[in-house]
Image: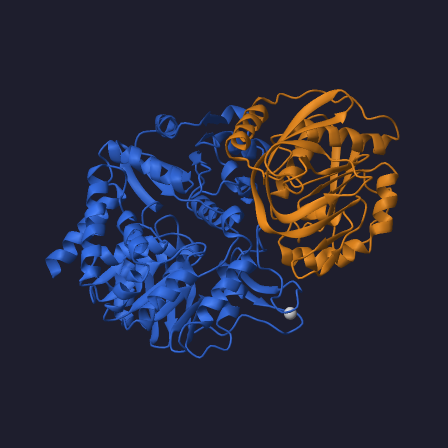
Chain colours: A blue, B orange
Amino acid sequence: MRLRLEIGLARLAGRLSRLAARGGGTTLPGKLLVAVDPGALATLAERLQHGAALVSATNGKTTTAAMTAEILGRRVRLAHNRAGANLVSGVASALLDADGAELGLFEVDEAAFPEVARRVRPRVVTLGNLFRDQLDRYGELELVAERWRHALASLPADTVAVVNADDPLVAGLARGRGAALRFGLDDPSVARERLPHAADSKYCVSCGTPYEYEAAYVGHLGAYRCPRGDDERPPLDVAARSISLEGLERSSFDLVTPQGTRRVTVGLPGLYNVYNAVAAAALSLTLGATLDEVAEGLARFRAAFGRFERIAVGDRTVLMLLVKNPAGANEAIRTLVDGGPPALALVALNDEIADGRDVSWIWDVDFEPLAASLERLVVSGSRAQELALRFKYGGLELDRLDVVPDLEAGLDRALKLAPPGSTVPVLPTYTAMLALRRVVADRGLVRPYWEREERFDELVGRAR
Amino acid sequence: MKVVVGHLYPDYLNIYADRGNMAVLAARAAWRGIELEVRGIGLGDRLVPGEHDLLYIGGGQDREQALIAPDFAGRATALEEALLGGAAALAVCGGYQLFGRYYRDRGGVELPGAGFFDLHTVAGERRMIGDVLLSCSLEPGVERTLAGFENHAGRTILGPSAEPLGRVVAGFGNDGESGYEGCRRGRALGTYLHGPLLPRNPWLADWLLAQALAHSTGGEPPELEPLPDDLEAAAHEVSAERAHERGGRFD
Ligand SMILES: [Zn+2]
């Protein structure tokens, strides 16, 4: 009874928050609920008939969870924090928003993972990768991995760990665990020649010797081996082979699983999205999906918001690529340049807490391949000046550089420079991405992210 | 004119955008027609005193720092000979700690340093994270500011013979209490400021280049041709603003 009252009040707060146009109202109900009753999250999660699955990673958790939702959404009713509110309060809000849900599917912030896992008691956890990210907020990689290790150890032995075998630190977490599924890439023809500058876990987790790579795919992810023989990439249970990267449109690959092999196409470019697709496939199979459902779901999938999202703005198109850490930015840039080096781009850097207040990471991003083809670059955001320096010292001529700190003005400058019919790549940090989407939404061109949730709410309501 | 930079452990210590500091040194040298060569010095490589005009060491995660610390401590004599011979140095973050006598972690285990700076570092309870602004006087009567970002759990305590790099205007500094940041011994500087340091504080990049040239030519540090630094000044201003808004100090 008490819980029902609390739920009612928390939902009401969400509606009021949206009415007052204070933003998405996506976490306020959950915050309230968790504040009045910290045990409520566990109680709500217990009601999920098929249990819950958590997805965490430095990069790709939103996309991986969204792909999984696409695969499973026709089979079961989901509670899914699709707007990316991935702290305890966001998970609670998603549960509040979707009662009657049968399966919980939650992307979870790396630092919040232990607490969410403790409260939700998931059936499956998917751990994608660990890259250096916002050291001012998360701390060092080893520290995050250690917290994950403890969280995993405190879950029942039958909780399945779906882990990226290509990341030494993450693969190590499932070492010796019976209920584990290991995924990765297996196609040296798409590997990088060498590790990028910002590669992280490149020293053996056991002895500290640099790994030898048979293939490095994304950052330090790949087929690694300690020359002393005490660690190597474990055998893959679910793998992508014969990968074909088809420009900015899609990629396809042979999805090799214990249930068989299937050629799969995903409507997202880039090797890092192949990782996301393989992770989503491994997770979905663990949750009971068939190989057909996996292939069809991935084929239907369209970009999660801000992640290779295309938005029409008049007769131009904005291609929004969220960037938030060196590894993610390197892959976004590589994919963009491989799809045809752009002559114009907008890069936007904010330094709010959600972006990381320490902006030093932009110096570890390989922007040079992007800068090489640019005739014009607009830098924007509250730290636009710092970006300007990054490109100045990266070799971009100053007459190609426009410094426009105001985001709306920056977007307009870029759109004005773009020929009609063309696509403008926009690379914003998290809060810059939200702000730019809001600008476009105010002009009536894209639904704000919480409207999708409302719509989702409606659909679930109708299904009941 | 030529400057040779020795970059210590570039594969291990590069976490806080150390590449940015190197890019700034290289570009500002090139724009003035000065040749600048960077030579990496990795685990087990020799450090030959006199070979480098400027030594650079950056920051790493605890694990990487522990992997190279014994190797670096073993070079104490060569490092001292190189620096007393007039080479310049910039040591940032973890590298700054390793330029001191030792780093003591929370378990009481001491990681040895090279001991060129009279200081030691003790792991603290809280990390000191945030924007920071310093006031420095590297030349008598010339007061300048440095803007950067710090992120360290270590509290660095200067010994009696150590001279700080600067006074904290906003932020934490060496230990969050003394009001001092960094260390200076002759042409060698150590600091917690990354951000990275040199792009938005180009005067410091030029000071280091001039000191390195002095070592290379055997003369006095030359007056370097000024460069248009409008963008650098704008970035410095924003960074200094952040330090004023957000920088804190333990009380
Ligand atoms: Zn090993």
Q: Can residue A183 be seen at all in this image of the molecule?
A: no
Above or below for B130 versus A66: above
A24, A129: nearer the viewer: A24
Q: Is residue A387 left or right of residue A245?
A: right
User: x%, y% of residue A325?
Assistant: 49, 47
A403, A335: nearer the viewer: A403
A427, B242: nearer the viewer: B242
User: x%, y% of residue A456?
Assistant: 19, 53
User: x%, y% of residue A319?
Assistant: 35, 41
Looking at the image, in which quadrant does ligand 1 appear?
bottom right
Q: Quadrant of the rendered structure where residue B149 is?
A: top right
- Give the quarter of the figure containing the C terminus of chain B: top right
Q: Quadrant of the rendered structure where residue A394 is?
A: top right
Q: Is residue B229 left or right of residue B8?
A: left
- Give the quarter of the figure containing the N terminus of chain B: top right
B78, A4: nearer the viewer: A4
* Residue that sits furthest to the bottom in the current view: A178
* Total marks placed: 0
Residue at horizontal 57%, vertical 59%? Answer: A201
Q: Can residue A305 be seen at all in this image of the molecule?
A: yes
Q: Is residue B221 left or right of residue B154?
A: right
Q: Is residue A55 left or right of residue B16?
A: left
